[in-house]
Structures are given as C-alpha cells and as structure tokens.
Image (cartoon, grey):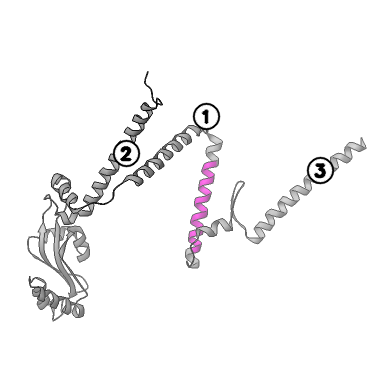
Amino acid sequence: MRKWVFIILLVLSATSCKVADTLADTAAELFRGEVVARVGDHKLRRSQLEKYIPQGVSSEDSTNLARQYIDAWAEDLLLLDMADQQLSKEEKDVSKELEDYRRTLLKYRYEQRYIEQRLDTLITEEEVSRFYKDNPDKFRLERPVIKARYLIIPADSKSVNNLRRLIASDDEADIVDAAAIASVAAIKFVDQADYWTDALTLAQDLGMEYQTLIGSLKSSSIEYTDAAGNLHLAHIVEMIAEGKTAPVEFVREHIRDLILSTRKHNLEVSLERELLEDARANNKYVIY
C-alpha cells in the first residue's frame, strides 16, 4: 500500500511540475511582451504582428494597423472555432472541394505555360488596322472623345485675352507663345491637340461636372470661373460624338489586347484538340 502511495505522489509531483512549467512559460511570454493577444488556445505573437506593420509609419498609424490586424486575426479564429464546433463531420469534410481546386489549379498552370511558350505577342500596325476595319461595332463610343487645349489662370490676369486667342489658333508659333506665356501667368496649361481624350477625363482635368462639359461642347470654347477666382479655359480642337466609331488612335491599345486575347483563346482550343488527338492516337482515350 505504501508503495502505491509513493507512486501516486511521484505522478502528482511530475504533473505539478509540468503545470508549473507551462504557467511559468506563459507568464514569461506575457512579461516579455511576446504574446499580444489570445483567442482560446491560439496566441498571436509580437513577431507575427510586426511582419504586418510597414517600416517608417507613425506611432499612431502603427497602433491603428496593429488593432486592425489583431481584430481580423481574432475574428478569423473565432469563426473557424465556431465552424469546427457547429458543423457536422460530413460538413467539415472538404476533401472533395480541395481536390477539385487542386485539379483546376494544376490545369490552369499548365495552360498558362503552354500559352506563354507559344503566344506571339508581336502585333503589326497592319493587323491593328485590319481588326479595326473588320470590327467597327466593337468601337462605338460611349462618351465623346476630344482633342483640346486648356488652361487655368487667375480670372483677373492681364494675359487672359491674349491666351484665349493664342490657344484657339491653328498656327504652331501661336501655340509656342501660349505655352511660354502660360508658364509664367497660368496655374496650369495642357496641350492635348494631338491626341484624343475621353470627355469624362477632360471634365475631371478641368475641374468641372461632366454634364456641364457636355452642355458646353456646342461651342469650341469652354469657360468658367471657380470659387477661388480662377478661370478655366478650354479650346476644343476636334471632337467625335458619342455613338460614333472611335478613332483608331484612341483604341489602338484596346485592339492589341483584343488580338492577344483571341490568340490566347485559339491556343487554348489548340491545346484541347491536341490532347484529344494524341490520346486517341495512343489509345489512351477510347469511347465504347
């Protein structure tokens, strides 16, 4: 009997030591500040948190980012724990979904390698022009596109009338003079007479409402004075209205993307066809 008592005391002593060691480790972590948050048995350590905080941020921003991360970390684990408790064994079995995702990912990666190895990314101007002519309906404008010159200048500037005349000129020398004067007198001067700009972008650049700009397009000149007393002045060099076919210069990059997309699709179809033909030829694919 005394023998068994002695054994039990040894076991209790060993267990107490383990518990004490665990409590000591936890206390040491907290004392050193290594653990910054806990959710159930999960601990968030300072080293994990520091990876999320960018270098060079202020103390206030660092604190806010840390709080956001800790809250997100806690919410994620709480939801995961709740799902683990409440869902049935069958509901927690995600092996099929994981296998489906693995197969989809592997196929996608192989398709990307196949395409990258065979895709011709060189697109000539002739191909761009041919695609543009063959697909006019793809390039109907949803908004007007505009070539314009515009400036922002104090409304009381003595250079306003001169600049108004110069930016509306077709003479290249006048435009050079306008740029020179605007560099001194104007807050901003932009010459977009050689390329097309979406009307919405132009309205944003001018600091005006889009509908206000559209209502002003009946005239070749647009003017308004803002609350700060600055005159926004634009001269419309050329415009293509909504619903018309966009100029090829405006949609050139879009055309290149469409051509590349078509080539990628053709390669995908080619891959599928090659796989089936090779499998049939090698007797790997048989229909009974």
The label on residue 268 is 2
User: Which residue does the numbered mark 3 point to in the structure image?
Assistant: 12
Left or right? Give the position of 56 relative to 157.
right
Q: Quadrant of residue 4?
A: top right
Q: Earlier in the sequence, mark 2 or mark 1?
A: 1
- The amino acid pointed to by label 1 is Glu
Q: In this rendering, which labeled residue sits more in front, label 2 or label 1? A: 2
Q: CA distance from mark 3 to mark 2?
A: 68 Å
At horizontal 49% and vertical 51% (from top left) the residue drawn is: 72
Residue 230 in sight in this render:
no
Task: Give the residues in magenta.
Answer: 62-80
Can you tell which quarter of the image residue 284 is in? top left
Q: Which mark is residue 249?
A: none
Q: In terms of depth relative to the viewer, which is nearer, 37 or 7?
A: 7
Which residue is at the far front?
Answer: 281
Above-or-below relation of 244 to 277? below
Position of the N terminus by quadrant: top right
With respect to residue 41, does 55 lie above or below? Answer: below
Q: Main secondary structure of the magenta part?
A: helix
Give the amino acid at mark 3: Leu
| Rendering coords of residue 183 (x, y %) | 20, 78
Labels 3 and 1: the sequence-earlier one: 3
Q: Position of residue 189 (x, y in %)?
A: 19, 72
Find disc 1 in the rendering and name its residue: 90
Dot 1: within a 10 Å radius of its alpha carbon, few (fewer than 14), some, or many (20 or more) residues? few
Under circle 1, the secondary element is: loop
Secondary structure under the numbered disc 3 in the rendered image: helix
Query: Which label lies toward us, 3 or 1?
Result: 1
